[in-house]
Image: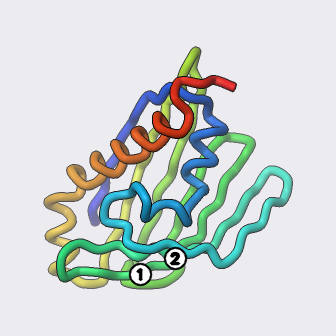
Amino acid sequence: MPKASVKRLIECNKNQLIDLVLDIEKYPEFVPFCLDAQVYERNDKGELVSIIADLTIGKGPFKDTYKSDVKLNKKDNTIKVTNIGGPLNYLENIWHFREQEKSTEISFDINFEIENKFLNIVMTKSFQFGLDKIADAFQKRAEKLFGNSKN
């Protein structure tokens, strides 16, 4: 199964970054390989925000849509994403947000398996590169939207 991790230090507050990650419908505007995004359900109940969403990911002739259950735990500032439908046998990714002096450290861990064994092998070989591009996209988007504001 492809596994990867990435960390970034971004000059904005953690709530701004959490909001950016939860703004799933905007992903096609800035996330590489994300062709479409649709949120079906969003519930905010105290310490837990729960979102059900589809992402369509693709490059070249390959394109697939998968459904995710996205949960923000406000107590520990983590977002956990699990697969609930689509071409993945398994998906778990976890975002951690840790506020520092004038910035926030964001870490992203992902572990997944694609049903198609050939695509799984291809993704395993290039996945860290793709994840770095995605992390760069989130960092650039945060810098564009929030500059170095800490409000």
Q: Quadrant of residue 121?
A: bottom left
Work out whether residue 11 or residue 84 is closer to the camera in this orientation and state it.
11
Query: Toward the viewer: 69 or 18?
Result: 18
Residue 60, quarter of the rendered image: bottom left
Amino acid bearing label 1: Thr
- In this picture, residue 58 sits left or right of residue 139: left
Q: Residue furthest top?
A: 101
- Residue 65's disc number: 1
Instruction: State the image coordinates of residue 11 (x, y, percent, origin top left).
Output: 50, 25
Which residue is drawn at the image coordinates 60% and 56% (left, top)?
A: 22
Tell whether label 2 touches label 1 (CB within 8 Å).
yes
Estimate how packed mark 1 is, as few (under 14), some (14 to 19) or many (20 or more) residues with alpha carbons within 10 Å. some
Horizontal and vertical percent position of residue 25: 55, 66
In the rendered view of the protein, which quadrant contains the N terminus?
bottom left
* Residue 118 vs residue 42, the one in the foreground: 42
Q: Quadrant of residue 63?
A: bottom left
At x 37%, y 60%, the residue is 111
Residue type at mark 2: give it: Asp
Residue extending farthest right: 46
Q: Which residue is mark 2?
A: 54
Q: Is residue 134 left or right of residue 94?
A: left
Classify mark 2: residues with Cα within 10 Å, few (<14), some (14-19) or many (20+).
many
Picture residue at 34% right of the left edge, 42% below the top = 136
Compared with residue 87, is residue 18 higher up or lower down, i.e. above or below? above
Up/down of 73 relative to 25, above or below: above
The answer to whether residue 35 is above or below residue 3 is below
Residue at the image point whose x is 59% and y is 57% from the top: 23
SS category of the residue bearing label 2: strand
The x, y position of residue 74, in whole percent, is: 73, 45
